[in-house]
Image (tube, coloured by chain):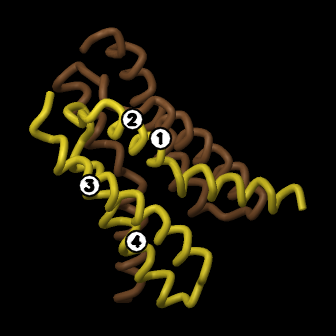
Chain colours: A yellow, B brown
Amino acid sequence: MFWKVIGMSAAFLTMFSFVPQIAKALKTRSVKDVSLVTLIQMASGVTLWIVYGIYLKDAIIIVANLVTLSTMLVLLNLYRAYRKKG
Amino acid sequence: MFWKVIGMSAAFLTMFSFVPQIAKALKTRSVKDVSLVTLIQMASGVTLWIVYGIYLKDAIIIVANLVTLSTMLVLLNLYRAYRKKG
């Protein structure tokens, strides 16, 4: 039980780690200092994790990375909207 | 072999995803638009992944998250150094 909580907390924290970045971008409407390469690299990486999860038939890998991919797509759209500013 | 390459590419891309952000911060010396909460949340998450990996005795989980944690610690130090700017 203890270790299940550790694992789930780890997954939860990393899976939603870009949510505060989304909130900050929405608030400041500026993404000047955010690395676009980091966003694209992370989005590509979690997409490959989803593909690998489908191959492994592992629902946890698929769902966790689908969540992260969703936040990355939101962030990439915000980046496109705000990149001209700053 | 094909799927091994997919899995390793996924791991490589996500593991090093903050390296371009480090490069950008070093170049611009500004982190104003970067979310500190995202950095702390990601660092905490990968730390818990390392703990969970030690429990599972899984070298891949441990090493991959140690690499990400190292990049997060570099980035948090850059954040501290540059946060007054901008």
User: Dot 2, crowdedness within 10 Å: few (<14), some or many (≥20)?
Assistant: some
Who comes first in sequence, dot 2 or dot 3?
2
- Residue beneath disc 1: A20
Question: Quick one: SS at disc 2?
Answer: helix
Numbered disc 3: what chain? A
Q: Amino acid at mark 4?
A: Met
Disc 2 to disc 4, C-alpha distance: 32 Å
Which kind of residue does numbered mark 2 sit on? Lys
Indicate which disc residue A76 carries: 3
Q: Check if mark 1's residue and mark 2's residue have beta carbons within 8 Å.
A: yes
* Chain under numbered label 2: A
Determine which quarter of the picture holds residue B43. Answer: top right
Instruction: Rate crowding at label 1 as few (under 14), some (14 to 19) or many (20 or more) other CA atoms within 10 Å.
Output: some
Quarter of the image where one finds residue B13? bottom left
Q: Is residue A76 above or below residue B29?
A: below
Name the residue that disc number 4 marks: B8
Picture layout, residue B35 above or below residue B31: below
- Which amino acid does the dot numbered 1 rest on? Pro
Disc 4 sits on a residue from what chain?
B
Residue B76: percent from left, percent from top: 45, 26
User: Tag 1, which secondary structure?
Assistant: helix
| B44 left or right, relative to A44 | right
